[in-house]
Image (tube, rainbow, N blue to C red):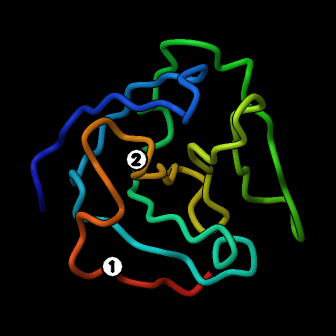
Amino acid sequence: MAEPVEMDGACHCGTVRFRVKLTDGLKTARRCNCSFCRMRGAVAVSAAYGDITFLACEDALTLYQFNTRSAEHYFCSTCGIYTHHRRRSNPNQYDINVACLNGVSPFDFAEVAVVDG
């Protein structure tokens, strides 16, 4: 298990800003192969539900749900960037878009696991 780390993040336009505690650091990096995530293509890392704090404009987030409407996918209503989602498979966790984290790029990972969504 990796050391917990707190990171700041934001959407593309900077309207939505947040701080997240990643219990396992960036070790949980993965892609999901569900119909929606496959089209989105984001690399995500896990955070416990409640370990994300919005520093600015949480009210600028818009919610998208599909199929069973169990997962909650959040996007900035200004720039459209996916910031995070609450998982269907584990509603006690959020997946955070690594591209929104300060100093992190999805291209930083040599390999990214794919999970069956």
Q: Badge 1: how crowded within 10 Å, few (<14), some, or many (20+)? A: some
Task: Answer with mark 1 or mark 2, whichever residue precedes in sequence.
Answer: 2
Of the pair 25 and 48, the residue shown nearer to us: 25
Q: Is residue 78 left or right of residue 42?
A: right
Q: Nearer the viewer, mark 1 or mark 2?
A: 1
Instruction: Classify mark 1: helix, strand or loop.
Output: loop
Does residue 33 lie above or below 87 as drawn? below
Q: Identity of the amino acid at label 2?
A: Ala
Residue sitting at 62 percent across and 50 percent down? 86
Does residue 106 lie above or below 7 as drawn? below
Q: Badge 2: how crowded within 10 Å, few (<14), some, or many (20+)? A: many
Residue sitting at 40 percent across and 47 percent down? 47
Instruction: Measure the alpha-carbon separation of dots 1 and 2.
Output: 17 Å
Which residue is under mark 1?
112
Q: Identity of the amino acid at label 1?
A: Val
CB under 8 Å between discs 1 and 2? no
- On residue 47, which mark appears? 2
- On residue 81, which mark appears? none
Residue sitting at 24 percent across and 56 percent down? 26
Question: In the image, residue 90 lies at what x, y percent?
Answer: 56, 62
Does residue 39 lie above or below 72 as drawn? below
Question: In the image, residue 89 lies at what x, y percent?
Answer: 61, 69
Count of numbered labels shown in the rendering: 2
Which corner quadrant of the image does residue 77 belong to? top right
Instruction: Classify mark 2: helix, strand or loop.
Output: strand
Q: Is residue 12 left or right of residue 36?
A: left
Of the pair 74 and 77, the residue shown nearer to us: 77
